[in-house]
């Protein structure tokens, strides 16, 4: 099932200009999600990162992966008033690797899956791809808080 940008905005605690997922392409509740980010030259950070050689910041790739994990979590628990108040906080980013640059015009595909869910703790694996090439990957741990 595909989700639109409006659906995403209703699920994420972040808002413009800090949403790094444009659409959800596919997901399986409690298991995995595939999301898309279209990288435009008009992004707010490109004038400073870097003026003559724009590169999508690696930490924002991690943020996009984390937002994908949040979306999977919120979709998995269902839309309730209690769920809408929950926020995801990083507790660890492990084995993060940045394997290639992401440039304006690229489409980033985030593929994330839960490794383990324990009460309010999430352990997930994530990767960012451009085409068939993995450009970043990480293990992301977080907790769900009010």
Image (spheres, rainbow, N blue to C red):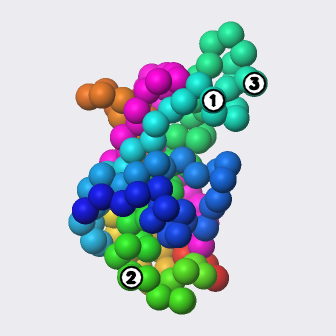
Q: Secondary structure at mark 1?
A: loop
**Cα distance between the residues tagged 1 and 2:** 34 Å
Residue at image coords 69%, 19%:
50
> Residue 115: horizontal and vertical position, in percent?
32, 63
- Do tag 3 and tag 1 residues touch (Cβ < 8 Å)? no
Q: Secondary structure at mark 3?
A: loop
**Cα distance between the residues tagged 2 and 3:** 39 Å
Query: Start and end of the magenta stretch?
Result: 87-113
> Residue 107: horizontal and vertical position, in percent?
40, 32
Within 10 Å of the Cα at label 3, are there few (<14), some (14-19), or many (20+) other Cα atoms?
few
Label 1: which residue? Answer: 42
Q: Quadrant of the N terminus?
A: bottom left
- Nearer the N terminus, badge 3 or badge 1? 1
Which mark is in front, 3 or 1? 1
Image side of residue 51 versus residue 120, left or right: right
- Nearer the N terminus, badge 1 or badge 2? 1
> Residue 94: horizontal and vertical position, in percent?
49, 49
> Residue 34: horizontal and vertical position, in percent?
32, 51
Label 3: which residue? Answer: 48
- Is residue 99 one of those drawn in magenta? yes
Residue lying farthest to the top in this orientation: 52
Residue at image coords 72%, 15%:
51
Label 2: which residue? Answer: 78
Residue 142 shows in the view: no
Residue at image coords 53%, 69%:
10
Within 10 Å of the Cα at label 2, are there few (<14), some (14-19), or many (20+) other Cα atoms?
few
Q: Is residue 79 above or below residue 132?
A: below
Q: Quadrant of the C terminus?
A: bottom right
Along the line of sight, which residue is nearer the eye, 5 or 48? 5
């Amino acid at each position: 099932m595909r989700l639109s940008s409006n659906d995403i905005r209703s699920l994420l605690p972040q808002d413009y200009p800090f949403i790094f997922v444009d659409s959800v392409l596919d997901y399986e509740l409690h298991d995995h999600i595939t999301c898309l980010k279209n990288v435009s030259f008009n992004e707010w950070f490109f004038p400073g990162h870097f003026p003559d050689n724009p590169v999508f910041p690696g930490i924002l790739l991690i943020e996009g992966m984390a937002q994908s994990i949040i979306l999977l979590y919120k979709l998995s628990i269902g839309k309730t008033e209690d769920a809408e108040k929950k926020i995801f906080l990083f507790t660890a980013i492990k084995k993060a690797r940045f394997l290639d640059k992401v440039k304006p015009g690229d489409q980033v595909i985030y593929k994330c899956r839960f490794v383990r869910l324990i009460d309010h703790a999430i352990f997930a694996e994530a990767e960012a791809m451009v085409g068939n090439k993995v450009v970043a990957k990480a293990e992301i741990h977080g907790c769900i808080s009010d």
